[in-house]
Image (cartoon, helix red, strand yellow):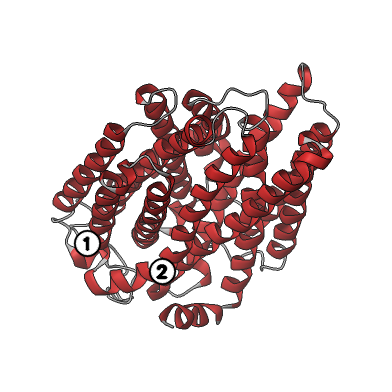
């Protein structure tokens, strides 16, 4: 009921409603395309899936944006973010349709494989870019006292939409892969992604041009000022201790999730399903990500009441502790039911933590820097995820089953919780509650403790 009331209050803002539709359509397309990519690259009958292969796919799709993201982030603070969203989704539509045609026509070898890799890279990199712009523009669609509530709804909407898109893609692959063939089924997945992306572009076109910012008079930079802009964004973060500490906690969560992504795909392919049982491997890994996605979705229901009761700072620490306990217990049991329980708890706690992190960054970063800071946020998100997969590839056995590695992850979360709570004690709970109903809307600037 509380979630329904929150959604009803936020739904009173017309631009927030429209932004929510953009996120629903766009991230449904993202989920569809990501499953299509995994089906094509990791679950092809001829592929030999390993943790290094998963890390390679993540590096291919995430690191290029991490390198170029800071250089394009100034665009989010220079041009209308609504226009950028429309253009990005139209570009992703075109990429998806070309991918569909090439894969369905078996144009996947030789030079065509390079074209496919570039298209996948562009499409999935644009995903992070447009999310950074939409997140930066979120503050313009709600009141300042509603940052926490809005930040809790959007991370719920996004995973729910991605879960829907991914599930639809999985059904296409499993049901039609046999009758039509693997390539034809994968091509249909990318057609569906294109339809969802064109829907997102249409929804974004209904948002007023200036609704998502940047504000008139905000600091504007040119592409030639990128290096200076990046340094400015980093200095802006360094002067805002709550945002900096919150982002570091999110980096720990993403390292753990990248580790688990590699673990889950490999353990289902080589231990639980066995060689030759590709459909079972796809269903098993897909089930893990689906249950984790349910946890992501429910984070929007539980994160705000918890933060209202104990505060944002303590909520971040508590979520790290939940992840530590889950990973070191049920997450260390090499059995499908136990791993599903862990996937739900990791998804729920990890996304609940992200709600708090998004709120802290929204509340402690000025609007004329939000585009750059949220792009830096995404760079950290991407690099941390890939780093987690690389660590997994370095320490896991061939079938990925390792109880000691899972317990070690739990210990890492525990150390992160202790470190965050100790480092954030100085600024205090009141500073971290800025931008929430508990903190009030009257504080326009961070306190001296927040800038320490």
The picture places residue 174, in percent across and down from the top left corner, at 70, 45
Q: Is residue 121 visible?
A: yes
Camera-nearest residue between 224 and 291: 291
- Relative height, residue 323 to residue 383 (above, below): below
Tell me which label, 1 or 2, sits earlier in the chain: 2
| Image mark for residue 147 | 2
Camera-nearest residue between 438 and 7: 7
User: What residue is rendered at 49% in x and 48% in y?
Assistant: 288
**Which image quarter: residue 430?**
bottom left
User: What residue is rendered at 41% in x and 81% in y?
Assistant: 2
Residue named by callout 1: 314
The picture places residue 404, in percent across and down from the top left corner, at 27, 32
Camera-nearest residue between 305 and 50: 50
- Residue at the farthest top position: 110
Q: With 424 as the anchor, is 55 left or right in this view?
A: right
Eye-nearest disc, 1 or 2: 1
């Amino acid at each position: 009921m509380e979630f329904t009331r929150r959604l009803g209050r936020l739904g009173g803002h017309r631009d927030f409603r429209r932004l929510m539709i953009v996120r629903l359509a766009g991230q449904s397309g993202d989920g569809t395309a990501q499953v299509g990519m995994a089906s094509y690259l990791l679950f092809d009958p001829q592929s030999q899936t390993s943790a290094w292969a998963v890390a390679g796919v993540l590096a291919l799709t995430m690191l290029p944006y991490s390198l170029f993201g800071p250089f394009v982030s100034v665009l989010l603070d220079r041009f209308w973010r609504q226009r950028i969203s429309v253009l990005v989704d139209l570009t992703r539509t075109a990429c998806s349709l070309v991918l569909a045609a090439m894969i369905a026509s078996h144009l996947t070898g030789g030079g065509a494989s390079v074209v496919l890799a570039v298209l996948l890279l562009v499409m999935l990199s644009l995903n992070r870019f447009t999310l950074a712009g939409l997140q930066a523009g979120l503050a313009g669609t709600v009141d300042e006292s509603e940052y926490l509530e809005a930040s809790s709804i959007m991370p719920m909407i996004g995973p729910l939409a991605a879960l829907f898109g991914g599930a639809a893609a999985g059904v296409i692959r499993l049901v039609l892969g046999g009758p039509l063939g693997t390539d034809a089924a994968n091509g249909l997945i990318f057609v569906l992604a294109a339809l969802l992306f064109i829907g997102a572009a249409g929804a974004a076109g209904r948002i007023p041009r200036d609704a998502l910012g940047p504000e008139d008079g905000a600091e504007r930079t040119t592409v030639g000022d990128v290096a200076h802009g990046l340094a400015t964004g980093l200095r802006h973060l360094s002067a805002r201790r709550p945002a900096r500490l919150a982002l570091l906690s999110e980096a720990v969560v993403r390292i753990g999730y990248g580790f688990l992504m590699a673990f889950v795909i490999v353990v289902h392919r080589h231990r639980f399903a066995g060689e030759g049982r590709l459909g079972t491997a796809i269903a098993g890994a897909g089930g893990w990500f689906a249950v984790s996605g349910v946890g992501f979705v429910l984070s929007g229901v539980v994160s705000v009441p918890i933060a209202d009761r104990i505060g944002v700072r303590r909520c971040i620490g508590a979520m790290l502790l939940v992840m530590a306990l889950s990973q070191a217990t049920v997450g260390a049991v090499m059995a499908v039911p136990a791993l599903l329980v862990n996937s739900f708890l990791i998804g729920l706690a990890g996304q609940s933590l992200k709600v708090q992190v998004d709120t802290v960054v929204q509340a402690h970063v000025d609007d004329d820097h939000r585009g750059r800071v949220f792009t830096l946020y995404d760079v950290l998100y991407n690099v941390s995820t890939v780093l987690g997969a690389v660590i997994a590839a370095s320490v896991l056995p061939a079938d990925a089953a390792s109880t000691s590695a899972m317990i070690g992850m739990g210990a890492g979360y525990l150390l992160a919780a202790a470190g965050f709570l100790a480092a954030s004690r100085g600024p205090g709970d009141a500073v971290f509650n800025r931008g929430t109903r508990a903190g009030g809307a009257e504080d326009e600037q961070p306190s001296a403790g927040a800038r320490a």
